[in-house]
Image: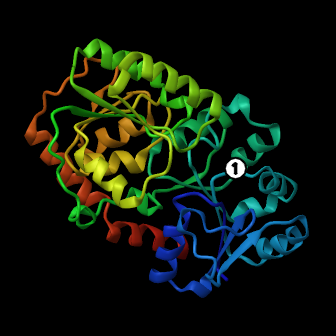
């Protein structure tokens, strides 16, 4: 076992495990998933190189794996037990590669001293955005080596996935507002921007099935219904993958007001489909897309439907070139073999 992966079970993880096992030697990888075995997000419970960390008694086995591995890839610093273990055994940090997810390091004041120590002393980080690395350098005094990789299949644009999608004949404008039920989406700001735009005959689609608490979700439901009535369309349950693709395929404009890096997978799909996307310039993704030559629009300005077809076609071309399966394979090979 060359590479030990430590992760929570999230929607990105089952496809990632399958991709690694199909494109690299499975014997070189062991995936430790924190929690009890479950088939959520399409997880296959019969994969041989998956170890479920579902009891305290298995922590000793985990420690053995940590010392045996040549490289430890931590997919998000979410679990306090893992963070504490790295704090107590700092020599392990020399071979830790941390996949930065965003919510696991933003707002340093909300994180423990132990976690701040671990972030400061991690030697290698994996992210595609330079802004996230700059963030931990500034707020955690970290100085890691940056390995540029977009890591998950959700960040891949594959045009063939949309062949079965159908263009819906519709009179209304479909507006996608945010990507989750987390308050970092700043839904109220987006709703006010939509109101100010003067756009009518809308369908305001608001994904609220992922990553949030009930109190905030209920608040947004109440506000959305009051502001938009039957034009408000919250997504409260996970939809199938094909339904998700078909929804993105039929979106007209997308509004993301996050000040932090979130929703990258959604944004790549939307830009690859040639949709008009509004972003917050404070987000590190703004700079990422600007550097790639991808045109995104300022969420703080006026919201409209005016589009430049040449710009959107250029967006599609760049996304297909940059966020491809071959690029991901190359990037992962570099991370695994270094």
At 38% from the left and 47% from the top, the residue drawn is 266
- Residue 253 seen in render: yes
Up-down relation of residue 44 to residue 96 (above or below): below
Q: Nearer the viewer, residue 321 or 272?
A: 272
Across the whole image, how many numbered discs are drawn on residues? 1
Viewer can see residue 338? no
Place residue 63 in its image quadrant: bottom right
Is 89 situated left or right of 227 in this image?
right
**Label 1 Cα neighbours within 10 Å, binned few <14 / some 14-19 / many ≥20:** some
Residue at point 69% right, 53% down?
A: 122
Residue 143 rendering spot, x and y as whole percentages: 62, 46
Task: Indicate whether 195 appears above or below 104.
Answer: above
Q: Of helix, strand and loop, which one carries label 1?
A: loop
Q: Where is residue 208 drawn, in percent x and y? A: 50, 38
Q: Which image quarter holds the N terminus?
A: bottom right
Q: Residue at x 30, y 48 (%)?
A: 248
* Image position, residue 278 (x, y; %): 30, 31
Question: Is the residue 57 above or below the residue 197 in the image?
Answer: below
Q: Is residue 161 left or right of residue 148?
A: left
Say which of 204 and 303 sits in front: 204
Q: Name the residue that disc number 1 marks.
A: 78
Residue with the most extreme front position: 230
In screen coordinates, is 261 left or right of 110? Answer: left
Residue 305 appears in which quarter of the rendering? Answer: top left
User: Looking at the rendering, in which quadrant would you find the C terminus?
Assistant: bottom right
Q: How is the image coloured?
A: rainbow
- Kindly identify the residue that appears in the image at 50 percent across and 27 percent down: 221
* Residue closest to the eye, 236 or 116: 236
Image coords of residue 281 (percent x, y): 38, 27
């Amino acid at each position: 076992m060359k590479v030990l992966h430590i992760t929570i079970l999230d929607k990105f993880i089952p496809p990632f495990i399958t991709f690694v096992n199909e494109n690299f030697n499975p014997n070189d990888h062991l995936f430790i998933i924190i929690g009890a075995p479950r088939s959520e997000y399409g997880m296959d419970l019969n994969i041989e190189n998956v170890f479920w960390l579902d009891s305290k008694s298995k922590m000793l086995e985990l420690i053995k794996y940590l010392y045996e591995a040549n490289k430890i890839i931590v997919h998000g610093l979410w679990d306090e037990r893992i963070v504490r273990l790295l704090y107590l055994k700092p020599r392990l940090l020399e071979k830790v590669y941390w996949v930065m997810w965003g919510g696991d390091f933003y707002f340093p004041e909300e994180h423990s001293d132990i976690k701040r120590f671990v972030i400061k002393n991690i030697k290698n980080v994996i992210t595609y955005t330079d802004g996230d690395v700059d963030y931990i350098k500034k707020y955690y005094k970290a100085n890691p080596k940056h390995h540029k990789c977009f890591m998950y299949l959700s960040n891949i644009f594959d045009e063939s996935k949309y062949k079965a999608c159908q263009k819906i004949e519709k009179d209304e404008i479909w507006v996608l507002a945010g990507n989750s039920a987390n308050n970092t989406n700043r839904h109220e700001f987006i709703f006010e921007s939509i109101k100010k735009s003067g756009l009518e005959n809308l369908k305001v689609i608001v994904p609220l099935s992922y990553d949030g608490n009930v109190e905030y979700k209920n608040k947004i439901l109440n506000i959305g219904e009051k502001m938009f009535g039957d034009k408000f369309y919250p997504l409260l349950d996970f939809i199938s993958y094909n339904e998700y693709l078909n929804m993105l395929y039929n979106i007209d404009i997308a509004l993301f007001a996050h000040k932090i890096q979130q929703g990258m997978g959604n944004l790549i799909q939307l830009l690859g489909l040639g949709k008009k996307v509004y972003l917050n310039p404070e987000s590190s993704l703004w700079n990422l897309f600007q550097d790639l030559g991808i045109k995104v629009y300022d969420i703080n300005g006026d919201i409209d439907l005016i589009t430049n077809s040449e710009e959107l076609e250029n967006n599609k071309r760049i996304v297909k070139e940059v966020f491809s399966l071959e690029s991901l394979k190359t990037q992962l090979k570099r991370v695994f073999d270094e």
